[in-house]
Image (cartoon, coloured by chain):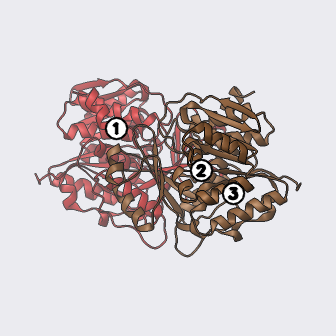
Chain colours: A brown, B red
């Protein structure tokens, strides 16, 4: 095994979130499916932004959030993703580096801007996301540094990476490099609609190349096309060495071989669910790479998720390390 | 009196806030005076940003916040301020227009970026601000449309406008145009250090050209160089037709001729005091221009302030109009 310099290296669509509060009627008026992430082009993004209430801007991206939260929890983290040479790119890069995340990816120049995710939060706390991929569509295999991948204990890939054209190839290159170095590959399924768009590729990848799988209930049932969570969970157990499956307020279930660990959710007043799954994966992996038992890993995931859903925005506002230190032995 | 198309027109330094949470030691390490606003140049802004934890971006600016909050409360609002033709300028302009605020100011082109305020929030909820004025320094008399000023019941000016070179002249032009049209001029003192930098000019302006004065305790005692709030309040009573003086958790005092109205603060868990004064002025003026009695105006100010200090960022996250409708008859 190569020398490990990082606990986690994340790869994902790098973007800035624009979060706003809307009534449910706004979603129906704009034909949005509550809870889903859809891709929109530049023109649709302009149109939707013009129709949106005032926003709150913060760095986002699924794997980006996971890397940020894991770094806040003390993990050594690197991240690969493509932002442009613009103000929002500055924001994203700053927010990663300020947490000590190694973020070596070259900026895109030439006019295509940094990706944005327009996030509508309804009064029930659900988030509905509209992503303009911008600079992310140029992320490809050349952006994957195999030596860096080899130096990380876990390579963490977001499912959303299957959307931009070149990123799937980057994804496979990273997974290959990680395994050749004797490291682990983790995948988050990201979104049920994303799974739906790429089910065959995901199934192949999960069965053949993933060691640690993160998914929520709708994603895992969509992946295996099962009617119940229990059936889907058993399918995941057969496919991967370790699966952490989240079920919102019902907590999470961790499966490893014949072992099953059940984790309860941490109570929270839900204001905005954006980033809940990302934070869970971060807490879990920060614990996992620190050698903690599965119960503690799951508990760290739940604590991180509870923090981010208690305010607008996907990244923690409170001192997460202090929260975890108090709650996890 | 000219026909009134707007309840309030605000003029101020248009900027985007970058808010972060720091320990008190960060302030001392960077020689910051807690609670104050200081001006920094582009290079210092780069340096401080590089040293800052991850941020949350949101539209700001003192009068900008007041205009936004007043519009949320149903007032008809216009705003004049200078942003650049860049992504942060887009954010600022969007956030104003999304609230129905008329924002006709031409963007600055040529490279100087939109202003940013780097805001450090300490565990006690106090905010310490470092402002890079960027495009704001080009705001001048030519940016003041006298017909627009004449069409607003209240012209609201932020004290911070005294810092950039050309804005004082714009300020005086606006006040003159408002009075010639038989309208009112409101001024917020903004910051005790700002008052200190421009005391003579402020004193002259307040005595001669201001109808409604907003200030907090340290600002008003600094303006009149008095040792006690009571003495400073009496000086304000003698100078202006109407003064609304805020005292944090001690509430506010409204003075009009011999009349004194005392308003209690609305209890709130303080997370970030940024924008508290701006929101108070917004609530007050939304009530005032709607013809409400002083007690209701002050209560609307307190409710708006309580909302914004309960979360990070200076602009309300909750449905302020619903809150006010419940609490103010």
* Residue at position x 63%, y 60% in the image: A201
The residue labelled by disc 3 is: A205
Chain of the residue under the numbered disc 2 shown in the image? A
Quarter the C terminus of chain A occupies? top right
Chain of the residue under the numbered disc 1 shown in the image? B
Where residue A128 sits: x, y (%)?
45, 49
* Residue at position x 16%, y 54% in the image: B180
Quarter the N terminus of chain A occupies? bottom right
The residue labelled by disc 2 is: A223
Q: Secondary structure at mark 1?
A: loop
Give how far apart the Cα atoms at labels 3 and 2 are.
11 Å
| Number of residues whose C-alpha sits closer than 10 Å to that of mark 2, classed few (under 14), some (14–19) or many (20 or more) | many
The residue labelled by disc 1 is: B319
Where residue B243 sits: x, y (%)?
28, 35
Q: Secondary structure at mark 3?
A: helix
Give how far apart the Cα atoms at labels 1 and 2 are.
39 Å
Q: Is residue A173 above or below residue B119?
A: below
Nearer the observer, A204 or B55: A204
Q: Secondary structure at mark 2?
A: helix
| Number of residues whose C-alpha sits closer than 10 Å to that of mark 1, classed few (under 14), some (14–19) or many (20 or more) | few
Question: Is circle 1 on the same chain as circle 3?
Answer: no
* Residue B200 appears in the figure: yes
Where residue A267 sits, quadrant-wise, is: top right
Where residue B261 sits: x, y (%)?
26, 25
| Number of residues whose C-alpha sits closer than 10 Å to that of mark 3, classed few (under 14), some (14–19) or many (20 or more) | some
């Amino acid at each position: 095994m190569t020398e490990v310099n990082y606990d986690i290296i994340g790869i994902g669509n790098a973007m800035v979130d624009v979060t706003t509060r809307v009534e449910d009627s706004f979603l129906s008026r704009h034909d949005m499916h509550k809870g889903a992430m859809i891709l929109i082009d530049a023109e649709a993004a302009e149109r939707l932004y013009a129709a949106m209430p005032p926003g709150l801007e913060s760095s986002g991206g699924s794997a980006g959030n996971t890397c940020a939260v894991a770094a806040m929890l003390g993990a050594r983290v690197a991240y690969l993703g493509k932002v442009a040479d613009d103000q929002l790119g500055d924001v994203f890069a700053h927010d990663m580096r300020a947490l000590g995340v190694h973020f070596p990816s070259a900026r895109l120049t030439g006019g295509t801007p940094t990706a944005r995710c327009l996030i509508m939060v309804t009064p029930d706390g659900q988030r509905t996301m509209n992503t303009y991929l911008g600079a992310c569509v140029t992320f490809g295999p050349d952006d994957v540094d195999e030596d860096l991948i080899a130096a990380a204990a876990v390579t963490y890939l977001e499912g959303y990476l299957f959307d931009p054209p070149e990123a799937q190839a980057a994804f496979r290159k990273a997974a290959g490099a990680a395994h050749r170095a004797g490291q682990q590959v983790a995948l988050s399924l990201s979104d049920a609609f994303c799974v739906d768009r790429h089910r065959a590729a995901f199934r192949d990848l999960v069965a053949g190349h993933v060691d640690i799988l993160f998914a929520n209930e709708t994603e895992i049932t969509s992946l295996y096309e099962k009617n119940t969570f229990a059936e889907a969970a058993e399918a995941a157990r057969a496919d991967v060495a370790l699966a952490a499956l989240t079920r919102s307020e019902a907590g999470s279930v961790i499966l490893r071989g014949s072992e099953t660990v059940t984790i309860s959710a941490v109570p929270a007043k839900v204001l905005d669910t954006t980033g809940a799954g990302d934070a869970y994966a971060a807490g879990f992996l920060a614990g996992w790479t620190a050698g903690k038992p599965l119960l503690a890993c799951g508990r760290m995931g739940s604590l991180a998720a509870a923090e981010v859903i208690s305010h607008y925005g996907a990244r923690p506002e409170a001192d997460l390390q202090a929260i975890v230190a108090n709650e996890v032995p």
